[in-house]
Image (spheres, rainbow, N blue to C red):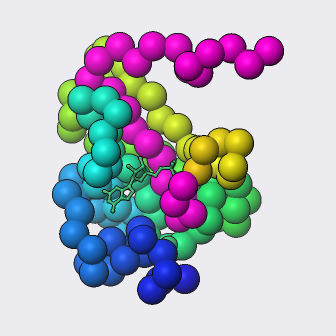
């Protein structure tokens, strides 16, 4: 991966992004099409396609992604009112970019977990 992956190219600095936090292993940047007042994507710098391959392949790195998400939530003032962290995964999960990313959403009441009940 790298040249073909949008988020690897953001890590490499080849595509601009509004970066809000960077650690040795993770990067957090604002979503280009925000769905909430705060909408930040948190990724491992190393390429994993989705949260399943990351979680099983490197659980420690998965934890670092969550730690960065928590730190950004604090920086953005979200911890008091709460927020949501989501990993869309695969076609049914609505994943569009196949470099794992946590969506950190907050800054307003986010409503129900899903737009409608499916059962
Ligand atoms: P997914 O549907 O894969 O869970 O989420 C992909 C997210 O990446 C979307 O929310 C979309 O707005 C965001 N996105 C797509 N292209 C770019 C880009 O070039 N820069 C940034 N910052 N976000 C992007
Ligand atoms: Zn990638």
Q: Residue at x 31, y 29 (%)?
A: 36
**Quadrant of the image containing the C terminus:** top right
Q: Is residue 117 above or below residue 8?
A: above
Among the 4 quarters of the image, the one containing residue 71: top left
**Residue 106 drawn in magenta:** yes
Q: Quadrant of ligand 1?
A: bottom left
At which x and y percent is residue 48? 59, 68
Q: Which residues are magenta?
A: 96-119
Nearer the observer, 51 or 34 = 34
Nearer the observer, 42 or 97 = 97
Chief SS of the magenta region:
loop
Q: Is residue 108 left or right of residue 55?
A: left
Q: Is residue 59 above or below residue 67?
A: below
At which x and y percent is residue 13? 26, 78
- Can you see residue 64? no
At which x and y percent is residue 69? 39, 44
Q: Residue at x 49, y 54 (%)?
A: 101
- Can you see residue 96? yes
Nearer the observer, 4 or 48 = 4
């Amino acid at each position: 991966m790298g040249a073909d992956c949008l988020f690897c190219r953001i890590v490499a600095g080849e595509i601009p992004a509004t970066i809000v936090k960077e650690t040795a292993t993770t990067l957090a940047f604002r979503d280009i099409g925000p769905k909430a007042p705060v909408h930040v994507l948190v990724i491992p710098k190393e390429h994993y396609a989705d949260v399943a391959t990351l979680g099983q392949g490197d659980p420690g790195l998965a934890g670092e992604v969550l730690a960065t998400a928590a730190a950004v939530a604090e920086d953005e003032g979200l911890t008091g009112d709460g927020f949501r962290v989501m990993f869309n995964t695969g076609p049914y999960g609505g994943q569009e970019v196949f470099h794992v990313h946590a969506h950190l959403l907050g800054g307003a009441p986010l409503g129900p977990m899903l737009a409608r009940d499916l059962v």
